[in-house]
Image: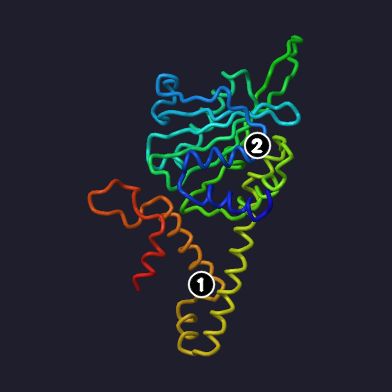
């Protein structure tokens, strides 16, 4: 698959509301040798009581065995509640851990978590490292280490573009003859690169805003006098303004802005601020 086709496939999958058929097609191209022979749908009766409050059903898309022999199950997990993508990450991770242990101690799961509203969803890689250690009595004990849910998990969909995360997946899709290892999949969905890009762009924006404020104060003495009267400098003003904007975006992401009368809390538009701007 060439880069243009890979880019189009990733954008159509990760920048859109969740679509099961599209997700399956994406996974089949990402994992070239996906075994679908035991795919199936598992309703509430197959879900343990500890998870029924959060998970409605799940689907096993298939099993992938990487070049090192590591088995990875591909799943779609449908959540019960709106807002659960953020609020119940630990439950989601624990559900996958329990699933992997009951399926022959598989090492990893590649999972799409989907809420009642499919416009935004979560794409996660959950891995268990099984390490053996010897106890003082000489017995061998298997110890589990679970990957942090934040590190290999990111929100995608209509309101979550995640361009950096998408770019990290391009190389795996471009090389259609190569089956990726679990380590390569981890590198592709590692959220640390996305976080680093955010702070770099935030720094650039802060410096640009400070320079613009300095220019305004140099031209307008009344504004300069007001800054002095309020004991505010341009770096402090820029920092506070950007912090308030980030906080508003946090509220928007939660669906807490623009909730219509009579509607459930958290159902506000995920694009509220831009919609408000367009009305001006």
Residue 122 image position (x, y, % from top left): 51, 42
Residue at 76% of width from left, 29% of height from top? 68
Q: Is residue 35 above or below residue 12?
A: above
Residue at the spot 45% in from the left edge and 39% down from the top edge: 114
Give the distance between the C-alpha atoms of the residues marked 2 and 1, in whole angstroms: 49 Å
Mark linked to residue 90 = none
Residue where numbered disc 2 is placed: 31
Instruction: Look at mark 1 in the image and give the residue it sits on.
Output: 237
Is 202 situated left or right of 131 in this image? left
Furthest residue toward left: 262
Of residue 186 and residue 141, the one placed in the foreground of this image is: 186
**Residue 198 falls left or right of residue 177:** left
* Scheme of colours in the image: rainbow
Give the SS element for disc 1: helix
Tell me if mark 2 has few (under 14), some (14-19) or many (20+) residues whose alpha carbon lies within 10 angstroms of its own: many
The image shows residue 54 at horizontal and vertical percentages of 41, 31
Residue 185: x and y in percent read 67, 40
**Mark 2 residue element:** loop
Question: Is 133 left or right of 145, judged from the image as shown?
Answer: right
User: Is 190 drawn above or below residue 223 in the view shown?
Assistant: above
Q: Is residue 135 left or right of residue 52?
A: right
Occupied quadrant, residue 111:
top right
Residue 269 in percent (x, y) is at 37, 55
Asked whether 276 or 72 is in front, the reply is 72
């Amino acid at each position: 698959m060439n880069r243009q086709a890979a880019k189009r496939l990733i954008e159509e999958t990760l920048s859109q509301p969740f679509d099961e058929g599209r997700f399956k097609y994406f996974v089949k191209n990402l994992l070239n040798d996906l075994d679908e022979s035991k795919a199936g749908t598992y309703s509430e009766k197959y879900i343990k009581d500890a998870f029924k409050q959060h998970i409605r059903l799940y689907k096993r898309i298939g099993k992938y065995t990487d070049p090192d022999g590591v088995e990875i199950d591909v799943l779609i997990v449908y959540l019960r509640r709106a807002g659960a993508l953020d609020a119940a990450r630990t439950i989601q991770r624990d559900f996958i851990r329990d699933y992997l242990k009951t399926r022959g101690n598989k090492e990893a799961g590649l999972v799409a978590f989907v809420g009642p509203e499919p416009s935004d969803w979560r794409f996660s890689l959950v891995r268990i490292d099984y390490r053996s250690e010897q106890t003082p009595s000489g017995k061998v004990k298997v110890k589990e280490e679970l990957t942090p849910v934040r590190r290999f998990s990111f929100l995608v969909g209509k309101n979550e573009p995640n361009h950096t995360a998408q770019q990290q997946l391009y190389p795996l899709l471009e090389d259609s003859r190569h089956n990726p290892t679990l380590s390569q999949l981890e590198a592709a969905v590692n959220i640390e690169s996305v976080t680093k890009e955010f702070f770099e762009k935030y720094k650039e924006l802060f410096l640009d805003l400070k320079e613009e404020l300095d220019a305004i104060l140099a031209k307008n003495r009344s504004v300069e006098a007001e800054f002095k009267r309020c004991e505010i400098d341009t770096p402090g003003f820029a920092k506070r303004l950007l912090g308030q904007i980030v906080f508003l975006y946090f509220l928007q992401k939660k669906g807490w802005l623009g909730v219509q009368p009579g509607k459930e809390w958290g159902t506000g538009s995920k694009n509220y601020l831009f919609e408000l701007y367009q009305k001006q």
